Image: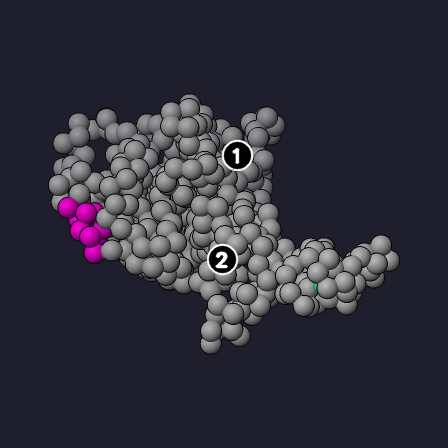
Amino acid sequence: MLALKSLRTHAKVDVADLKASLVALSDGPWKPAFTESQRALARCAGAGDDLVPKLGPTFALRPSFGSPGESFGDLIFRDGSAYYVFTSLSEDPFLEVGVVQPGADATDLDEFADAVKQAILSSLDGRKTRHMRLDWSAVRTTSTQLDNLVASERETSGIELQRARLDSDELKAAVVLEPRTTRTILIEISQAGFAREQDILARRGKAKEEAREALNELKSAGLVGVEYLVECKKAGTPISRLQSPDDLSDPAVARLKCPGCGRTFPEESLSEAFSMSELGKRMTRKSHWMTVAVTSRLVEIGVPIEGILWNISEGGDEVDLVVDVVGDLWLFELKDREFGAGDAHPFNYRQVRYKAAKAVVITTEKVSPDARRVFQELSREGRGQRSNPIYVEGLENTEPVLTQEIEAAYRRQAARKLIRVGSTTGIDFRPLLKAHFEIPELEQETVDYGDYFMSPAVFRSWGGLGGFAEEDL
Ligand SMILES: [Zn+2]
């Protein structure tokens, strides 16, 4: 997956200072693309590198942070990745480095951040750098948005959202509960309160082997507790429940006699019986197992777990998961049954209320044709979201369907970031990015970013450098 990773430090580095530092950096293995081109330009005029900080476009798109001259960045293409360094001198100045690379592990980013730091220290005056904070920390965009949501939901609607947390017991239990057979048996045990293995198997007909297997899995995942039943050999009635067969060797128990036939307990028959454990109750309440199963898949796809919220409210049929996918909210509704027309309206309402960018319906069965029709009508009437929800029918299809959608979101974010950094040089970096990466979204970003930043006509029509806000990008 093409992913963006960023580090930021709250240091104020002027544009000219960053340019000088990038000249120093380009003497090493990291070659800033724009800076290298400026060095070549200076050489053409028989001048040296000291000219580079003075070179720049005659005009540039008003950058996303502050006014022109208040931000600058450069890109380094290396080993199939694109690194960037970016300075912003807005009210809250910062210096940022980042990398867009295939695969989730941005292992070289620390090395790059350190090289940038050394370049700054070596090329700037010590009086300037003495108080400069060059301690990098990871840029996280998800936390604040989700924290605000947790607080506002608690206040306005009483919905209790909580950061997702995967623990190994719940993960194992969720895997065991995924096949329908284990879920059915667990529910049967829960309804009976206490059930003997032979009774569970008796109801299974030919599927006994499958049921026995399922029981073993329920047992080993700790979803059911096992107890032992002493039964009268004569009448077949239960006479006592034991925690362990070993209890029968306790002389106090071994002495006890059946009131019906007079045999001692060890002489009577002993069978296993099951009851739902605390874990079992937790996993089946509001189909929590599904929440865990979907969360673990999202994490596997590459969504950070800090970006996932669970709805832990008691009762109610509210949203199940709220996920921050690179700054956009995605809403998930999980159903261990068919998703019907009656589910569509409330879900659409929630989507609007949360201003969700995408809605995802995951059902263990089907999304009914009526429900699909409701969503289509709502979006046609402009009362719903612009696009229909993403439908996942069958939990096993979660990964293939969502991987595609999530990867596209990540690519879009990465493309946007690199274009934005590149735009501060006055050069349109899109053709370079296209040549370097396969990013279909680059075509799409044309609409958002426009061809305007090197077009004098459009530039004039804006009235020069005025009037662009961050949201214009
Ligand atoms: Zn008896």
Res. 356 visible in picture: yes
Q: Residues under labels 2 and 1: Cα distance? A: 57 Å
Query: Is residue 236 highlighted in magenta?
Result: no
Which mark, residue 420? Answer: none
Query: What are the residue bounds of the magenta stretch?
Result: 369-377
> In front here: 122 or 188?
188
| The residue positioned farthest toward the right in the image shown | 251
**Neighbour class for label 2 at 10 Å: few (<14), some, many (≥20)?**
some
**Which amino acid type corresponds to the residue marked 2 in the rendered image?**
Glu
Dominant secondary structure, magenta: helix
Where residue 81 sits: x, y (%)?
A: 44, 56
Query: Is residue 373 highlighted in magenta?
Result: yes
The number of numbered discs placed on residues in the rendered structure image is 2
Q: Quadrant of ligand 1?
A: bottom right
Which mark, residue 9? Answer: 1
**Neighbour class for label 1 at 10 Å: few (<14), some, many (≥20)?**
some
Q: For the residues carrying marks 2 and 1, which lies nearer the camera in this image?
A: 2
**Residue at x 25%, y 45% (from the top left corner):** 342
Give the mark, 2 or 1, whose residue is nearer the N terminus.
1
**Residue at x 69%, y 57% (from the top left corner):** 239
User: Does residue 201 appear left or right of residue 14 in this picture?
Assistant: right
Within the image, what quadrant is residue 64 found in? top left
Where residue 254 sits: x, y (%)?
A: 82, 60
Where residue 391 sits: x, y (%)?
A: 30, 55
Within the image, what quadrant is residue 419 found in? top left
Position of 263 relative to 311 (above/below): below
**Which amino acid type corresponds to the residue marked 1 in the rendered image?**
Thr
Which mark, residue 188? Answer: 2
**Residue at x 61%, y 28% (from the top left corner):** 130
Q: What element carries label 1?
A: strand
User: Does residue 423 appear left or right of residue 455 in this picture?
Assistant: right
Q: Which quadrant is the C terminus positioned in? A: top left
